[in-house]
Image (cartoon, helix red, strand yellow):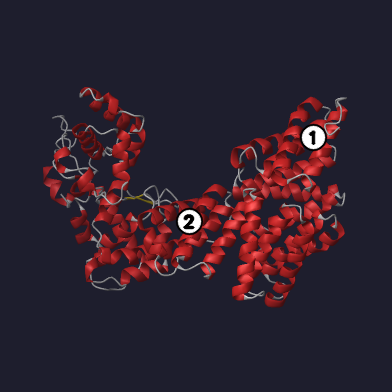
């Protein structure tokens, strides 16, 4: 039934007292309700119901040995759909297959649904093969949609995250232009396509239960059942798959704003959609020139503090670019730069240095000392040298970077301000705080003027200026800046982002210098717990948090509490950074001071 109007004569009189009438339909149409009729949505099984169904069916056949703990993952992979679960359990029983083995079969994208959810497994008498049931109303949706757009729209939707896709994707130029250029394989002649047409098509697909279009779920308005998406993909001609994948990637990139900000939740949605797209059609994103979306997604992972995910992403991207583009192609070199930087963020400074030095040499040899890629590689390598305590080497590189960017971009370009900011950080590490101060003030003023008060880069410049004030002993000047940065980061990134915890640590350091030790303590305990959870127990930033907390415990006279922290911080820095690193030297001094407070012998004696 596709026309609810034809049901009008058949509805019983309202409140006739003659009993109840139950009508079932997959159609979502306002004409089905009214005159006292009430709609009851029947969803898929809940996770608990789906697991219970699997376990009860196998127990009824005395096959509980097939339950190997994977039934929850299996139910999730099937989207908790009763139709699919019925077929899947019948297959398990027939083939004497464990849940884990069947899950592996299901996740094998070389197999289609007809093989793994076959007709003969319809033991619950649904009466249709799974793919046919999932796409039952597609023909009706195609007939109703403007410009014959239902099927092309559904094919694009099927490549993206089933859990939620932004509606703005369907207003982007790549989608509008692609769907206006369809060929005869895509059910409809080429005609102008507007955002209104696409919105109507999405609403029609929602009406026929092929997708869910929920305007209340901002940023994730479009959802599709994972098995419906798979059925659509399996029935998409190979000749269309490349262009569909590239269109989806173009659209994601078009609506993805650079950098973290108030829309960090939307960045998470776009990353999830990118991951899904790569899983379904990644080979088409590598074909020819690797799509820019792949680089953008990696940078987004880094800016969001998802370092382990970024590491896996850049490793894969580097391997593919080396294979498809060659070891000396700019894409390969840029991927290597990003991988080296990610190693640095994870505290793997030796790997970052090795990769960074190789990459800088390759850039200089292939593209010259003044190439933009060479400049970026030099800047990231300088950062690693700084973390390794080789401040003199870092300084020489950063002075080169700043001079090159002034020459290429001018004194007031954003890239020049980045170089100036990095140079100021190294000046501070070298104790040249008076040299750092004018650089920090210059960068903050420039970013306020060009980016505005509330841009993430402006907040970072404010934080760097506060650190310089603190190094100069100007703690009262540092305090309002630190407080403002923390407030802004909580609003922009959320309370649990790594940058927010860094702002919290900086404020705690200022509190400690001002003698406000109890306020510092509360912040530092929170920072240490967060870094252990987010970065791991042995990351350099975790050891820094441990050392800061130990110092505050000492300030408060809690030397027994400080001792294990100071001892762990020194052991970690010795292992990661070596005997002579400045951070190791400070950790050794902290432990020695703690021993003295406790009347213990010097640990180095």
Q: Quadrant of residue 149?
A: bottom left
Q: Who is closer to the viewer here, 14 or 546?
A: 546
Which of labels 2 and 1 is toward the front? 2
The spot of residue 209 in percent (x, y) is 26, 49
The circle drawn on residue 316 is: 2
Mark-to-mark CA distance, 2 and 1: 43 Å
Q: Quadrant of residue 290?
A: bottom left
SS category of the residue bearing label 2: helix
Q: Quadrant of residue 586?
A: top right
Q: Is residue 48 left or right of residue 472?
A: left
The circle drawn on residue 552 is: 1
For marks 2 and 1, the one nearer the N-term is: 2
In the picture, the quarter occupied by the C terminus is top right
Q: Residues within 10 Å of mark 2 (few under 14, many from 20)?
A: some
Q: Residues within 10 Å of mark 1 (few under 14, many from 20)?
A: many
SS category of the residue bearing label 1: helix
Residue at image coords 70%, 43%: 504
The spot of residue 298 in percent (x, y) is 52, 57
The spot of residue 362 in percent (x, y) is 60, 69
* Residue 147, placed above or below residue 561: below
Q: Is residue 554 left or right of residue 127?
A: right
* Residue 349, placed above or below residue 329: above
Q: Who is closer to the viewer here, 39 or 105?
A: 105
Q: Is residue 326 visible?
A: yes
């Amino acid at each position: 039934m596709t026309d609810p109007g034809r049901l009008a004569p058949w509805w019983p009189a309202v409140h006739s007292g003659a009993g109840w009438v139950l009508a079932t339909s997959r159609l979502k149409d306002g004409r089905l309700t009214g005159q006292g009729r009430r709609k009851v949505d029947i969803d898929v099984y809940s996770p608990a119901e789906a697991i219970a169904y699997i376990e009860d069916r196998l127990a009824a056949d005395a096959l509980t040995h097939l339950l190997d703990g994977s039934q929850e993952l299996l139910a999730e992979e099937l989207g908790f759909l009763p139709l699919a679960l019925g077929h899947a359990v019948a297959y398990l029983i027939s083939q004497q297959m464990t849940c884990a083995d069947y899950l592996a079969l299901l996740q094998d994208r070389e197999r289609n649904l007809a093989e793994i959810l076959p007709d003969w497994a319809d033991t619950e008498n649904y009466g249709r093969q799974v793919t046919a049931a999932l796409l039952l109303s597609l023909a009706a949706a195609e007939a109703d949609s403007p410009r014959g757009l239902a099927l092309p729209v559904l094919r694009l939707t099927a490549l993206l995250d089933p859990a939620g896709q932004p509606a703005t994707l369907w207003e982007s130029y790549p989608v509008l232009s692609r769907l206006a250029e369809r060929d005869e394989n895509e059910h409809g002649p080429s005609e102008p396509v507007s955002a209104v047409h696409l919105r109507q098509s999405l609403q029609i697909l929602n009406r026929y239960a092929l997708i869910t279009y929920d305007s209340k779920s901002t940023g994730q308005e479009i959802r599709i059942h994972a098995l419906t998406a798979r059925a659509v993909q399996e029935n998409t001609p190979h000749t269309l798959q490349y262009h569909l994948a590239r269109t989806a990637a173009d659209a994601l990139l078009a609506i993805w704003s650079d950098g973290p900000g108030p829309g960090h939740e939307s960045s998470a949605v776009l990353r999830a959609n990118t991951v899904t797209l790569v899983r379904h059609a990644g080979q088409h994103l590598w074909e020819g020139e690797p799509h820019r979306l792949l680089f953008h997604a990696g940078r987004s992972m880094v800016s969001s503090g998802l370092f382990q995910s970024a590491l896996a992403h850049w490793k894969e991207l580097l391997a593919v670019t080396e294979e498809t583009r060659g070891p000396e192609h700019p894409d390969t070199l840029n991927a290597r730069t990003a991988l080296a930087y990610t190693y640095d963020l994870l505290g793997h400074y030796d790997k970052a240095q090795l990769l960074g030095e190789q990459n800088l040499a390759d850039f200089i040899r292939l593209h010259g000392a003044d190439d933009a890629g060479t400049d970026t590689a030099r800047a990231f390598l300088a950062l690693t040298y700084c973390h390794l305590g080789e401040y003199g080497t870092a300084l020489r590189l950063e002075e080169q970077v700043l001079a090159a960017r002034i020459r290429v971009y001018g004194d007031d370009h954003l890239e020049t301000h980045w170089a100036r900011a990095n140079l100021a950080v190294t000046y501070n590490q070298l104790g040249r705080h008076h040299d750092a101060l004018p650089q920090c003030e210059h960068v903050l003023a420039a970013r306020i003027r060009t980016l505005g008060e509330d841009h993430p880069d402006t907040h970072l410049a404010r934080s760097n200026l506060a650190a310089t004030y603190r190094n100069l002993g100007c703690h009262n000047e540092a305090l309002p800046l630190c407080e403002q940065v923390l407030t802004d980061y909580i609003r922009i990134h959320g309370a649990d982002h790594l940058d927010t915890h860094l702002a919290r640590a900086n404020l705690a350091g200022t509190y400690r210098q001002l003698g406000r030790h109890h306020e510092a303590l509360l912040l530092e305990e929170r920072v240490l717990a967060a870094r252990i959870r987010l970065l791991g127990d042995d990351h350099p930033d975790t050891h820094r948090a441990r050392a800061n907390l130990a110092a505050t415990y000492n300030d408060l006279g809690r030397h027994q509490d400080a001792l294990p922290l100071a001892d762990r911080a020194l052991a970690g820095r010795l292992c990661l950074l070596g005997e002579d690193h400045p951070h190791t030297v400070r950790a050794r001094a902290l432990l020695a001071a703690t021993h003295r407070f406790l009347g213990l012998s010097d640990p180095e004696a």
